[in-house]
């Protein structure tokens, strides 16, 4: 007769302990990856804004960026030839009870995109003299745990800034 082989209780507990330790190390990295994903999306927006500002300056022609907060897309070009989708885990959104704009947070945020609408659509205009329409875009992860923002403040000289929302405060990134 053959002897049946099985795990002893000690072997089972040791194996389970190793799995728990691995899970404890790996789980925090998932939340960090969401933060990096959010940073990546706001960086893509920053690069797009910078590119269109430079293109307007170099070509002496107005450039436009179209933002569709409902479909989580933005695009450039006269016929929206270039369209970018936000990552599936990122949305044009804001955290409840967060105040904005990031540089001077005094009022509760009410809209995820504060650039003024033009003919019912959100359009950011980049003029040949370097000016950019003023406004802010807020992004969150799908769990609404992290938030970041891109702003073009009202100023004599247009510039683009990005911010992270941490512990109830805006930090420039």
Image (spheres, grey):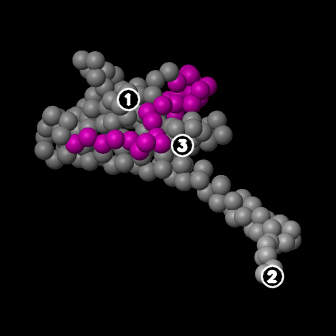
> Quarter of the image holding residue 15?
bottom right
SS at badge 1: loop
Residue 66 left/right relative to 106: left
Say the numbered circle drawn on residue 69: 1
Disc sitting over residue 1 in the figure: 2
Residue 16's quadrant in the figure? Answer: bottom right
Dot 1 crowding, Cα within 10 Å, few <14, some 14–19, many 20+: some
Find disc 3 in the rendering and name its residue.
164
* Location of residue 63 in the rendering, given as x and y in whole percent from the top left corner: 20, 37
Magenta-drawn segment: 82-109
Q: Earlier in the sequence, mark 1 or mark 2?
A: 2
| Left or right position of 63 against 23 | left
Q: Residue furthest top?
A: 119
**Callout in the foreground (3, 1):** 1
* Whether residue 2 is visible: yes
Asked whether, in this view, residue 91 is left or right of residue 80, the answer is right
How far apart are labels 3 and 1 at the CA level? 20 Å
- Badge 3 marks a residue whose secondary structure is strand
Asked if residue 84 is among those painted magenta in the image, a careful observer would answer yes
Q: Is residue 98 above or below residue 11?
A: above
Earlier residue among tags 3 and 1: 1
């Amino acid at each position: 007769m053959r002897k049946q082989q099985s795990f002893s209780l000690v072997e089972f507990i040791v194996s389970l302990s190793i799995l728990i330790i691995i899970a404890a190390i790996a789980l925090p990295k998932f939340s960090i990856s969401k933060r990096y994903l959010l940073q990546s999306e706001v960086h893509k927006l920053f690069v797009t804004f910078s590119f269109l500002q430079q293109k307007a300056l170099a070509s002496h022609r107005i450039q436009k960026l179209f933002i569709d907060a409902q479909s989580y897309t933005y695009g450039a070009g006269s016929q929206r030839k270039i369209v970018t989708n936000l990552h599936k885990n990122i949305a044009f959104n804001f955290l409840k009870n967060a105040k904005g704009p990031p540089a001077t947070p005094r009022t509760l945020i009410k809209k995820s995109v504060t650039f003024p609408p033009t003919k019912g659509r959100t359009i950011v205009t980049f003029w040949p003299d370097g000016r950019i329409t003023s406004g802010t875009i807020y992004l969150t992860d799908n769990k609404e745990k992290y938030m970041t923002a891109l702003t073009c403040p009202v100023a004599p000289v247009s510039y683009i800034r990005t911010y992270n929302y941490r512990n109830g405060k805006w930090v420039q990134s």
